[in-house]
Amino acid sequence: MPSRYIIIDVYECNGCGSCVEICPEVFAMNDEGDKAILLDSDAKITDKIEEAVAYCAQKCIELD
Ligand code: SF4
């Protein structure tokens, strides 16, 4: 299976934090607490990551 990358469109991110709640292994909030950041952009795509993508209200997490 080809490796996939996780990308957050930080312009669209509204800092709701749901991705961090669903998958804290991969997502975190930035120091300002207003945008999500990736802890590991090369993480294996798990069901939790897929769930975080599905629940992102802004649809700003992409799996490339
Ligand atoms: S779920 Fe989407 S909008 Fe919410 S913090 Fe994560 S990336 Fe940003």
Image (cartoon, rainbow, N blue to C red):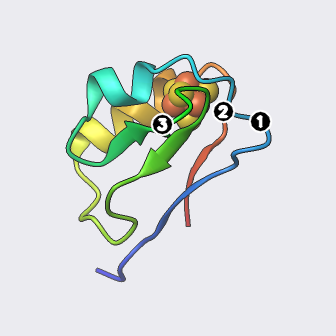
Q: Residue flagged by tag 1: what amino acid is it?
A: Glu
Q: Are marks 2 and 1 in contact (CB under 8 Å)?
A: yes
Residue on which the image places disc 2: 59
Look at the numbered disc 3 and give the secondary structure of its residue: helix
**Residue 44 locus on image (x, y percent):** 24, 64
Quarter of the image where ligand 1 sits:
top right
Q: Is residue 56 above or below residue 63?
A: above
**Residue 55 locus on image (x, y percent):** 48, 21
**Does the Cβ of the disc 1 residue fall within 8 Å of ligand 1?**
yes
Q: Is residue 39 above or below residue 44?
A: above
Q: Are marks 3 and 1 in contact (CB under 8 Å)?
A: no
**Does the Cβ of the disc 2 residue fall within 8 Å of ligand 1?**
yes
Q: Is residue 48 above or below residue 62?
A: above
First in sequence, mark 3 or 2: give its number. Answer: 3
Of 21 and 31, the residue lying toward us: 31
Q: Residue flagged by tag 2: what amino acid is it?
A: Lys
First in sequence, mark 2 or 1: give its number. Answer: 1
Residue on which the image places disc 1: 12
Q: Residue flagged by tag 3: what amino acid is it?
A: Val
Question: How many angstroms separate mark 2 from mark 1 (CA)?
Answer: 8 Å
Question: How many angstroms separate mark 3 from mark 1 (CA)?
Answer: 13 Å
Residue at the front extreme of this rendering: 31
Apparent side of residue 51 relative to residue 58 in the rendered image (left or right): left
Residue at figure coordinates x 32%, y 63% from the top left: 40
**Residue 24 locus on image (x, y percent):** 24, 35
Residue at figure coordinates x 62%, y 19% from the top left: 57
Look at the numbered disc 2 and give the secondary structure of its residue: loop
**Residue 30 locus on image (x, y percent):** 49, 40
Residue on which the image places disc 3: 53
Residue at the right extreme of this rendering: 11
